[in-house]
Image (tube, rainbow, N blue to C red):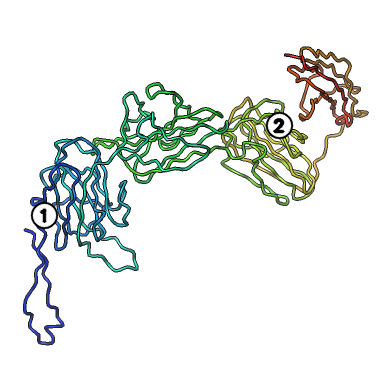
Amino acid sequence: MRRGSLISCGLLALALGALCASSVAVAAPANDAFANRQSLGGPLPVEVTGSNVGATHEGAEPSDADIPISGHSVWFEWEATDTEVITVGTCGSDFRTTLSVYTGDELASLTEVVSNQFSFGPDCRVSGRSEATFRAVAGTSYRIRVDGNPSHAADEPPVSGEGAIELSIHSTPPVPNDDFEDAQPLLGEFSVQAPNWAATKQGGEPAHRGKAGGASVWFRWTAPQSKGAFVQACSERIETIVAVYTGSAVGNLDAAPLIEPQSDCEYSFAAKAGVTYLIAVDAEFDPKRGSAEMGETGLSVHMFPGNDDFETAYALGSFPGGTSILVGLRTVGATKQAGEPNHAGNPGGASVWFNWTAFESGSVQISACNANFPTLLAAYTGFSLSNLTEIASRNAQNPGCPLLASKQGAIAFNTEAGTVYRIALDGYGGAWGGFNLEIQTSPDRLKVPPARRGAKRPNTKIKRKRIQGHRGRATFLLAATQPPSSFRCKLDSHPFRPCTPRVRLRHLKPGRHVFMARAVNAAGIDPSPAVLRFTIPKRAHG
């Protein structure tokens, strides 16, 4: 049997010979015992006041190591008249509380529905007060326990866990973006709140990430550019689920393909500029509640990788002779810019960029070792995509490479102090993945392989030309004075690129054009490229 507390007169009064006139007992509240729980009726809203001063703890009461209690519990009972989401709170109480909701008729065999020691609900924002939201089922009686929270800072005195209680129960309306049709519009890269209080699952709505869920909210986002997009809605309070789709109706959606495995609260995909994506944030189904979890979480979308474009290249450290290794880099989600050269002669399609300034004159060796995809590695000088000069490149169709310029996947070249070098790492055929970037500098110059005896740098000639101005086409036949030679060509402001002796240009725009070609052999490159200027009339077409 539970009894009230007894206040003693104290040893000091007895030592002075004073007589204790009376002993004052603080009576326990009427709803101290589970069997004497206070009925709150059914129709909402419910507002009731009370107290747990003098209340005690019954031995068979449920306990949870994650929910500390003071041992001054009082009990209430409420029967749901409708199936709906409701919120129970102690926001107006004058002490720190813990709140638990159960079903069951016997104290020793109660089933927990929800517990809270802090305000995790949609309304209460009072520090140390409790609030819990759950989906109540019509005709079900819920047992509500309110106790004190004994938690306190190390430099603070212990708390009694007793005081005046204000208990409320009210219906909780769903958030505005509960349905697909009411998806919240979002722009650019963002971070917003994505609570799912009282959210539901529509008819025809898919099982996000293959999970049952049941409390989803929706967002509508148009990609500002073509790049990888990383969506995250992780929470410490609930197990969230994120999915991304395209489509115009909830029953006819196509999931955006994941570009790498991720947890249920994260989603990475290749976004396309101007395409509208539908983002669903749901939560795991909780069997003990009979519904999905509800709570507060944040939603963010960020584009990646950050060094996808030439203009946003990552700056690499500049240092004297030695080796530097950058690990855990990725090209996942990368794209290829308009006007970007074909690195190492391959179109690629998923490049990232780095800037590296030579600390001293000498040489450098760069490799993308431990890559899990075939790489294209190239180094340039220049200050824009339209004004790049290739210094070195390597096409590594097989992943992995030692840190040696003569081995697969590495490049090496002589450097000049203070010069900025642009390093591009792409994937053969557009492949992407993870890699480490190794940079080894040296004050020593690389030895250039000697040209064969008597070899001379070639001169370049344009032997034949055919300009089909009315069709926007041009054909050139190149030759070199020192065979064997290869060729590099450029049109207008585009950079020099490897080309064949027969060059065909199509879809030329009306106006003046400048074509340049230079031959290359073992002795070097033609320092004076062959130049041809021609005009395409305005009536030209492809």
Q: Quadrant of the C terminus?
A: top right
The quarter in which the N terminus is drawn is: bottom left
Residue 59 percent across, percent down from the top left: 13, 55
Residue 444: percent from the left, percent from the top?
Answer: 79, 46
Please identify, in this view, whether the residue under mark 2 or under mark 1 is nearer the observer.
1
Q: State whether residue 511 is above or below residue 14.
A: above
Describe residue 392's horizontal placement relative to residue 33 as left or right: right
Tag 1 secondary structure: loop
* Vertical comparison of 440 with 537: above or below: below
Q: Which residue is located at x 79 percent, y 25 percent?
A: 491
Disc sitting over residue 31 in the figure: 1
Among all residues in the image, which is located at the extreme bottom?
Answer: 16
Q: Secondary structure at mark 2?
A: strand
**Viewer-nearest residue: 2 or 345:** 2
User: Which mark is first along the chain, 1 or 2?
Assistant: 1
Number of the label disc, if any, that sits on residue 394: 2
Left or right: where 315 falls relative to 449? left
Marks 2 and 1 sit apart, C-alpha to C-alpha, by: 80 Å
Question: Identity of the amino acid at label 1?
Answer: Asn
Task: Tell me the crowding category of disc 2: few under 14, some 14 to 19, or many 20 or more residues within 10 angstroms, Cα based.
Answer: many
Q: Is residue 259 above or below residue 196?
A: above
Q: Badge 1: few (under 14), some or many (20 or more) residues near its Cα, within 10 Å?
A: some
Left or right: 485, with 246 as reference point: right
Tell me which amino acid carries mark 2. Answer: Arg
Q: Nearer the viewer, residue 517 or 321?
A: 517
Q: Is residue 511 above or below residue 412?
A: above
- Residue 228 coordinates in the image, percent (x, y): 54, 33
Residue 329 rendering spot, x and y as whole percentages: 58, 40
User: How many numbered marks have been drawn onto this rendered protein structure?
Assistant: 2
Along the line of sight, the residue nearer the viewer: 396 or 461:
461
